[in-house]
Amino acid sequence: MELLSPAGNFEKLKAAVRFGADAVFMGGPAFGLRANAGNFSFDEMEEAFKYLHDRGKKGYVTVNIYPQTNELESIRQYLKKCEQLGADALIISDPGIFSIVKQEGIKTPVSISTQANTTNLAAVNFWASLGASRVIMAREVRKEDLVEIMKNAQCEVETFIHGAICISMSGRCLISSYMTGKDANNGECTHPCRWNYALMEEKRDGEYFPVYEDDRGTYLYNSKDLCLLDRIGELVKMGSASGKIEGRMKSIMYVSIVTGVYRQAIDLAVKDADNYKPLPEWRHLLESVSNRGYIEGFYGGEYDTNAVNRETSGYSRSAAFLGVALKDSSNDELEITCRAKFAPDEEITILTPDLKKIKVIPEIVLDEGNNKVEATRPNYIYKIPFKDKAPEGSLIMRF
Ligand code: SF4
């Protein structure tokens, strides 16, 4: 099973590759459903494909909006450009965009996006009969159906294994569009499903009547995040071609750690899927990145009464992200780019791409002019004494 990670920008793409992704998915300059992610210019996409291909990895481009007719000509040119730049697949939801790929004779394989909401075997094979190479299943499919689908599918099948989920059916949500004018189906979701709501009588402006779900608040639609870490053995066994981690808007820490955990999980499952059992340490690491609490979504086939996070619309995480190693450690020193403040006498942890945790109290932190500092500042470069080995891209964290 391929491990497929999100690449919101080039830095995150490199983080995903360092921590073990086989492939990444990214948005180009338009039409990619994450208007607020960093996304890639055409020049960056070209550079990204070279970076990936030099390392034996793949890059897929999301073109998964539902366009209006006046956008079709631009999309036609855009699809041709993606092929020319070396995309390994185009991720598409709209049958119109799919038909343009075929009309233009574009050879880049097509994956049908989860946004197309494919929930059954007949729909998978419908797309296969039209020439799709892969279908990314809707997240609303239970295990028994996935087994049947993968046994009989006439193309590859990809499944989501980790990340945020919508309370609505995948790819069929109008709440953001209705409430804010920003259309989730065009990549601009403002996440109103996660807001806290009150009731107001129309003539009593500003008088809010609380809507009590319980005394902590009311987050009626605030779904917890998907985590299929326990199911990786089953997914490998049933023949999932690819396991996708959601989150092009998430941080480098998130992309690195979640990718690193699932890399090790898939490697273990591939060796012996029947006896696959996740390590407690992996769960601990997944708790350290931003999350809304974890559930298995629809995989188990039953409604999970615990699926909504009613406590807060925000995220929780058990560790702080302090920085990233700029290059491989050398000469008993580690150079880092700082993301959050820390002091030289604090214990910090260096997390390497193979998930080794190295605890250090630096005692001395030097700035770029080799001056000792009392505390670091975000976005500056520092050096700390470091006798162990840590490659470029290792994370600096506080657990
Ligand atoms: S508003 Fe919520 S349910 Fe709707 S698309 Fe956005 S995240 Fe998904």
Image (cartoon, grey):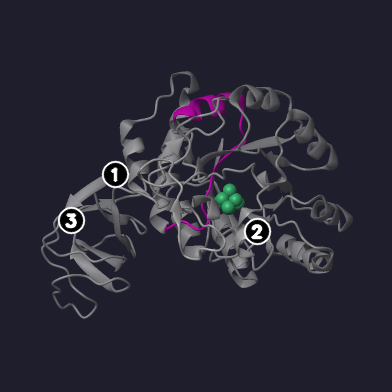
Q: Is residue 89 magenta?
A: no
Whether pointer 1 and pointer 3 mark residues with C-beta atoms closer than 8 Å, the reply is no
Badge 1 is on which residue? 356
Q: In front: 49, or 235? A: 235
Q: In front: 253, or 182? A: 182
**Horizontal and vertical percent position of residue 83:** 74, 60
Whether the residue carrying mark 1 lies under 8 Å from ligand 1 is answered with: no
Q: Residue furthest bottom?
A: 369
User: Dot 3 lies on which element?
Assistant: loop
Q: Distance between the residues labelled 3 and 2?
A: 56 Å
Categorize mark 2 by other alpha carbons within 10 Å: few (<14), some (14-19), many (20+). Answer: few
Q: Which mark is residue 178?
A: 2
Q: Which amino acid does label 2 sit on?
A: Tyr
Left or right of 114 on screen, residue 214: left
**Horizontal and vertical percent position of residue 96:** 83, 54
User: Is residue 380 positioned above or below 162 on the image?
Assistant: below
Q: Distance between the residues labelled 1 and 3?
A: 15 Å
Whether pointer 3 and pointer 2 mark residues with C-beta atoms closer than 8 Å, the reply is no
Left or right of 315 on screen, residue 376: left
User: Dot 1 lies on which element?
Assistant: loop
Q: Which amino acid does label 1 sit on?
A: Lys
Q: Which mark is residue 62?
A: none
User: Is residue 161 positioned above or below 101 on the image?
Assistant: above
Q: Residue at x 16, y 54 (%)?
A: 347
Categorize mark 3 by other alpha carbons within 10 Å: few (<14), some (14-19), many (20+). Answer: few
User: Is residue 288 positioned above or below 397 on the image?
Assistant: above
Q: How far apart are marks 1 and 2 (CA)?
A: 46 Å
Q: Residue 387 carries which label?
A: 3
